[in-house]
Image: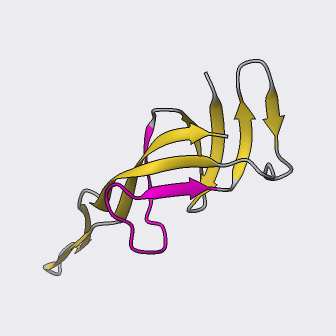
Amino acid sequence: MEVAVIKTGGKQYVVSKGDTIAIEKLPGDLKKGDTVVFNEVLLVDNGSDTTIGAPIIKGAEVKGTVVLAGLNKKLEVVKYKPKSRYFKRKGHRQPVLKVKIDSIS
């Protein structure tokens, strides 16, 4: 089983072929079915050999397909001050991409 650690959106993800990951929105107008290439690969392990980058592995890439491009669940933020009848409620939905990993090379 081939495993890789990729870096995108300021976060690191451990992925293998067939995994679906939810990541921060990438620049550009990506739609369902588009191909995404992750060039910042920090580690690749193919079972018998492990390659660790310093900090990234040159020439290594992880390819994936966009499964969903949309918004995450709503996060509700509440401000409240007792004894003054002050109550504010605000919602936020973070843009998210769900990507299915196709290949690690």
**Residue 96 placed where, x, y %?**
37, 60
Judge left or right: residue 5 versus residue 79: right
Q: Nearer the viewer, residue 84 or 25?
A: 25
Q: Nearer the viewer, residue 10 or 105?
A: 105
Q: Which quadrant of the figure has residue 40?
A: bottom right
Point 52% across, 32% down: residue: 17
Residue with the most extreme right position: 54
Quadrant in which the N terminus is drawn: top right
**Residue 94 placed where, x, y %?**
34, 66
Q: Is residue 25 above or below residue 61?
A: below
Q: Which quadrant of the figure has residue 9?
A: bottom right
Asked if residue 21 is among those painted magenta in the image, a careful observer would answer yes
Judge left or right: residue 60 versus residue 52: left
Q: Which residues are magenta?
A: 20-38
**Residue 93 placed where, x, y %?**
28, 66
Q: Nearer the viewer, residue 2 or 34?
A: 34
Residue with the most extreme left position: 85
**Residue 18 visible:** yes
The number of numbered discs placed on residues in the rendered structure image is 0
Point 82% across, 39% down: residue: 52
Q: Is residue 103 above or below residue 85?
A: above
Point 45% across, 75% down: residue: 28
